[in-house]
Image (cartoon, rainbow, N blue to C red):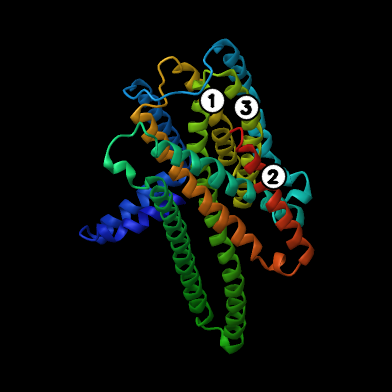
Amino acid sequence: DLFTALFFFIQPFLSPLSRDTTQHLCETVIDTMRITHSVKLLLFFFLISLLLISVSAGESKCECSHEEDEGNKAGATKYKIAAIPSVLIAGVIGVLFPLLGNFFPSLRPGTNFFFVTKAFAAGVILATGFMHVLPEGYEKLTSPCLKGEAWKFPFTGFIAMVAAILTLSVDSFATSYFHRLHNKTSKKIGEGEEQIGGGGGGDELGLHVHAHGHAHGIVSVDSGESEVQLHRTRVVAQVLEVGIIVHSVVIGISLGASQSPHTAKALFAALMFHQCFEGLGLGGCIAQGKFNCMSITIMSIFFSVTTPIGIAVGMGIASSYNESSQTALIVQGVLNAASAGILIYMSLVDFLAADFMHPKMQSNTGLRIMAHISLLIGAGIMSLLAKWA
């Protein structure tokens, strides 16, 4: 869905081609992308993040001072090894909990409990962006190890802003595309029914078919709007996972490359809660998107294994990794800033604004109060975890 919308956005630039050629090209690309769009999107961002940071491990020209205790690397290693399965399990539990609506009716989208849970998840994601990822981006891109006048520019805020705007653009163009697709389909259905209604058989038959067509059109509009919203929710879920994955790769490598037992222990404990709560938010979004079983499995696996793989990669490059090298600082800073922009936009616009302005929320004072409390609890817990992670 995401790739389809982006492709139709650039379709006007293909105008020099013939109409038939352009249409055939569009259909071919869309058919291919519909099959693998989730895998391509998530795999692309995951590999880019992983490879860029891995490459940056070799450069170590800057020698800034470190406050870490490097005296007991073996002690740090045991925490890293324990963190891999623990963080994996925490992520699986978090992302699968909202997906159990088929077995527990109270967990299904639209219930009061689901609204309250999603408000908690929105608070978690919002605090992750503001309290975890954005400060980390500022720290990296304002490091004294980055030489030159250019780095006096506030790149972190700029990159986060651009990432949020791009997320808005994807959200907007995707929604617009599916609206146009629905309107085109409805128009064809209406024209077909008008031809049937005017094709003889007396006024009585024509009136009957016309009335039926009118009623069908009303149903089509309602179901069509629901279909558009469903596609938009799927785009939101995929973009949200991209933001989480980019951040997870960075923080996983940070834990894996750490040589301090104290730092590794603190990160180990914090990451378990961090992964579980983020999974809760993503799982809720996936549940609303009503993905098929294969897509749910792929998205859940990608989310769950990203941080453990990052930890393993960090352990592998720990001996040569210099987090103060200019390349490492720039790559991590840019990825963190972009991830922060995505997470902040998604939490405010696609989670909080959408749910808190929902008619059910607006008409139920008790639900609205519970959702606000849940939001504050989620944001508060993740803000507290920023002390260790």
Q: Please give the count of numbered marks on the rendered protein.
A: 3
Please, what is the three-letter code of the amino acid marked with disc 3? Answer: Ala
Q: Name the residue under label 3.
A: 266
- Judge the density around disc 2: few (<14), some (14-19), many (≥20) Cα neighbours within 10 Å: many
Give the Cα distance between marks 2 and 1: 28 Å
The relative height of residue 74 versus residue 212 in the rendered view (above or below) is above
Q: How crowded is mark 3: few (under 14 residues within 10 Å), some or many (20 or more)?
A: some
The residue shown at (54%, 12%) is: 73
Mark 1: secondary structure: helix
Camera-side residue of 230 and 223: 230
Q: Is residue 257 depicted above or below 184 in this figure?
A: above
Q: Name the residue under label 2.
A: 98
The picture places residue 16, in percent across and down from the top left corner, at 20, 59
Kind of residue sitting beneath label 1: Leu
Give percent across and percent down for residue 286.
60, 47
Task: Give, as a three-letter code, the residue at label 2.
Answer: Pro
Distance CA(mark 3)–CA(mark 1): 10 Å
Residue wearing tag 1: 255
Q: Quadrant of the C terminus?
A: top right
Residue for point 35% across, 31% down = 145
